[in-house]
Amino acid sequence: MIDWLHNTSGLQPSRIHITGHSLGAHTAGLTGKYVTSGTVNRVTGLDPAGPSFYDKPSDQRIDKSNAAFVDIMHSNSGDLFQACFGLYDALGHVDFYPNGGMHQPGCVNTPEFDIDDWLDLAEDCSHMRSVDLWVESLTSVPSSSLTFTSWPCTDWEAFTVANCTSCGQGCLNMGFHVQQGLSGSYFLHTNSTSPFALGNIQ
């Protein structure tokens, strides 16, 4: 489709941004990979699906080679036995791990015997949170105090014990307004309900 648009209308792949959630994240990445008329500008993966993709090589899932810039938001990443449905591995140029990237505040993550707990888990609350965060970022103003400021860090444990309070090579705004040019893993806290962004509060 992108190649067809390029051939019929002159649309340049360098002006295209593809976004997908879960399985759609891999679809977005592979779409960018197979464009032949140029390099897609950006691909965003929202909690890329884990099941069936845990051991896939990079050419069969979303990967930083799929576009000039690939950013990933992990909101429910880990193993299925941890009630997670996304891939935890760093897959893009930048990978964001809100609240550690595994379970999100306000979502049931260890259901007991209460039917409401199981319904909450079945609705993929944490898995869908990446979509909520992305949608909120679309309407945020980068210069405002309510942005998804994210800090570069080695892992969530180091972040939570305040080992990564400095921006170092630079903090990033997670979401639509992310600044391109940096790379690595970034961490942040969010609220449990909308508005989720905490700005510069670590």
Image (cartoon, grey):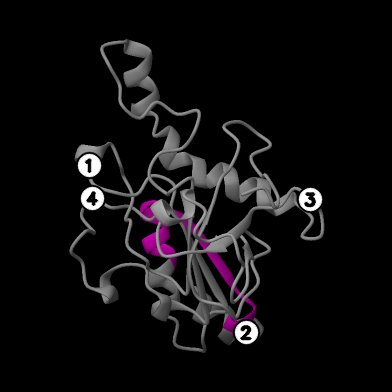
Residue 33, quarter of the rendered image: bottom left
Q: Spatial distance from mark 2 to mark 1, Cα to Cα? A: 39 Å
Which three-letter amino acid code belongs to the residue tagged 2? Answer: Gln
Disc 4 crowd rating (10 Å Cα; few below 14, some 14-19, many 20+) is some
Question: Which span is picked out in magenta?
Answer: 13-28
Which three-letter amino acid code belongs to the residue tagged 3? Answer: Ser
Give 155 or 131, whichever is nearer the viewer.
Answer: 155
Q: Nearer the viewer, mark 2 or mark 3?
A: 3
Dot placed on the residue nearer the N-terminal end, 2 or 4? 2
* Label pair 4/3, CB-CB below 8 angstroms: no
Secondary structure category for the residue under label 3: loop
Which three-letter amino acid code belongs to the residue tagged 1? Answer: Leu
Q: Spatial distance from mark 3 to mark 1, Cα to Cα? A: 36 Å
Which three-letter amino acid code belongs to the residue tagged 4? Answer: Pro
Q: Position of residue 65 (x, y in %)?
A: 40, 81
For residue 123, above or below residue 94: above
* Label pair 1/4, CB-CB below 8 angstroms: yes
Secondary structure category for the residue under label 2: loop
Q: Spatial distance from mark 2 to mark 3, Cα to Cα? A: 34 Å
Q: Spatial distance from mark 4 to mark 3, Cα to Cα? A: 37 Å
Q: Nearer the viewer, mark 1 or mark 4?
A: 1
Q: Position of residue 63 (x, y in %)?
A: 37, 73
Q: Which residue is mark 2?
A: 12
* Label pair 3/1, CB-CB below 8 angstroms: no
Q: Which mark is residue 51?
A: 4
Q: Position of residue 17 (x, y in %)?
A: 59, 70
Relative side of 108 to 40, left or right: left
Q: Residue at x 36, y 20 (%)?
A: 119
Q: Which residue is mark 1?
A: 80
Q: Which residue is mark 3?
A: 145
Dot placed on the residue nearer the N-terminal end, 2 or 3? 2
